[in-house]
Image (tube, rainbow, N blue to C red):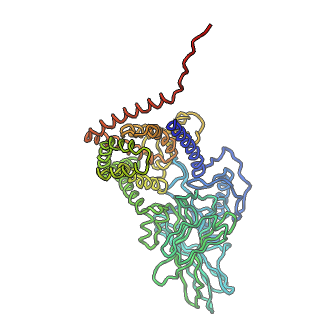
Amino acid sequence: MENQRNVILAMVLMALMLVGWDLGMRYYYPAPAKPAAGAPAASGSAPGAPAPASTLKPTREGGLQAPADVALEKKDLAQVLAAGHRIPVDAPGLKGSINLLGGLVDDLTLARHRETLDKNSQPVRLFSPAGTPAQHFAQVGWLGQNGVAAPGPDTMWQAEGAKLTPATPVTLKWTNPTGQTFAIRYAIDENYMITVTQAVTNVGAAPVALKPFALVNRTDRTASLDTWNVHSGPIAAFDGAVTFDTNYADVKTTGAVSPAGSANWIGFTDIYWLSALIPDTASGAVQPKGDFRSVAPDIFRADLIYPVATVAPGQTATQTVRLFAGAKENNVLEAYEKQGATNLSLSIDWGWFRWFEKPIFWLLDSLFRAVHNFGLAIILLTVIVRGIMFPVAQRQFSSMAAMRAIQPKLKVIQERFKDDKQKQQQEIMALYKAEGVNPLAGCLPIFLQIPVFFALYKVLVLTIEMRHQPFYGWIKDLSAPDPLHVLNLFGLLPFTPPAFLAIGVLAILLGITMWAQFKLQPAAMDPAQQQVMALMPWMMMFVMAPFAAGLLIYWITSNLLTIAQQKYLYSKHPQLKAQASKDQLDIDRVVAREQKAAAPKTPPRKPKTR
């Protein structure tokens, strides 16, 4: 009866876990809202005025969610870009334009990344002009001191150059009434870096004081989801240390957050995208401070703050800052680190275990470059991991064989000291020591796989390299869950099952391979434990179904290799297989005996009397 109660309790806990998992997945990975066909656009908003806020929860990749916001963004963007006075940006990594009104970099899309899997979908938009619902832009400039006129948001700059490309920089110029000429030179590379050089030349009769600045301004309405293991929001490196501690709510609550130290770079991150300002680190360059500010209910700013500079008559003062605006591609970020962007690759939130995750990513990326398919690369990674752990598995099976060999002695101790549990444990430990058996040796392969599994999970969740990478057949994105669900007949029925019932083909394969793996393992001595372990594969099938398809491919491959490994090792340890079969028969007898004892007894029938 106690065993039956334990099994029932285990099943109830499993059910609660499944329901809780579904709620957690809905909380951490809400589905993006799809614009309804013909959805009415919200009333127009003037450029510079924040659009009405949306209350929808961010999705994993971010972006506007409300259909009204999407429609309004499209309308406002077309209106602002049609106004003209713009310099086109045309580089392999970035496309867009620079606004001559205010000298803003406020129109950038990522040429190598698209919004959806559809090859005809639009490139990802990172920067959008001020006043649009997806507002996100960068600006450099000066604050005039003691009445000196400096360019502002209404300044119309004059351009020298027709288009910004890697081969053709562009310079903007403006002269104030007192004889100071301001210039901003933009140069762009093949990827996502724009080098901005500010210069002011004083041709007046007296010195002038100016305070240079640089900023990134954005809304949090397009932010990706900020979770316990993936940071989204304000991010910076100060004195070489990258901080993930500040989020939008912190800045909104305090109004401003000013980390200590000099800023190596500062900006905002989403799961895949980054906009950051990187000041010049050359010898003698002025090192700025940095802070994050809340400038409106849903508008935030990352600032580089420079000290006041005095420009003597006939002199020119210059200031250089680089603007990174693009995808967090690891190789690109590491290349920028070599060019002086301190720890820029750590904008990818590897977490505490990056010492292990980055090598896993490097190996996976190297395999991908060899086979040109990330799914195959994951399978090859699994083969390599299992190959490395093969000697450990051999030790595990040897330990299991030794444990089986001492089972009769264990039973004697358990019977002899069944009323003295403390003495029983002491005698069992003495037996383990005398026989040279480690009861935990069988757990070692599992513990060794946990870091690999977690590292691969982080790689699939974090890295832009995995985004929209196909495998074969119906798997078009290894970083997303299996899209085919059994309950809607693999998409034929027009509904999406809830997360805990969204069982796909990969999840079913996972359950089957795990069941086959458990069937080959020696059965647990406790019948209740055995029943719980029999349920484990199907419980894991439900739990793992919402995870990335690439992670399920890793686990299925690992299960298949484990099954092959077990069959091989059983052939090397025939006594283990024989003992396991005998133990299974013993357990079956115990279960049958307990079921018979638990069955209600029929009272003897009384003889009929007339």
Q: Nearer the viewer, residue 239 or 351?
A: 351
Looking at the image, the residue that sits furthest to the bottom is: 205
Quadrant in which the C terminus is drawn:
top right
Residue 423 vs 341, above or below: the answer is: above
Looking at the image, the residue that sits furthest to the left is: 572
Residue 90 image point, x, y percent: 51, 63
Residue 364 image point, x, y percent: 38, 54
22 relative to 434 in the view: left or right: right
Residue 8, image quadrant: top right
Residue 461 image point, x, y percent: 49, 54
Residue 244 image point, x, y percent: 54, 66
Whether residue 557 is visible, yes or no, is no
Whether residue 201 is visible, yes or no, is yes
Q: Nearer the viewer, residue 429 or 584?
A: 429
Residue 529 vs 29, above or below: the answer is: above
Residue 509, image quadrant: top left
Residue 49, image quadrant: bottom right
239 relative to 291 in the view: left or right: left
Q: Nearer the viewer, residue 581 or 354?
A: 581
Q: Identify the residue at horizontal 54%, vertical 61% (top origin).
A: 231
Residue 94 vs 114, above or below: the answer is: below
Residue 160 vs 385, above or below: the answer is: below
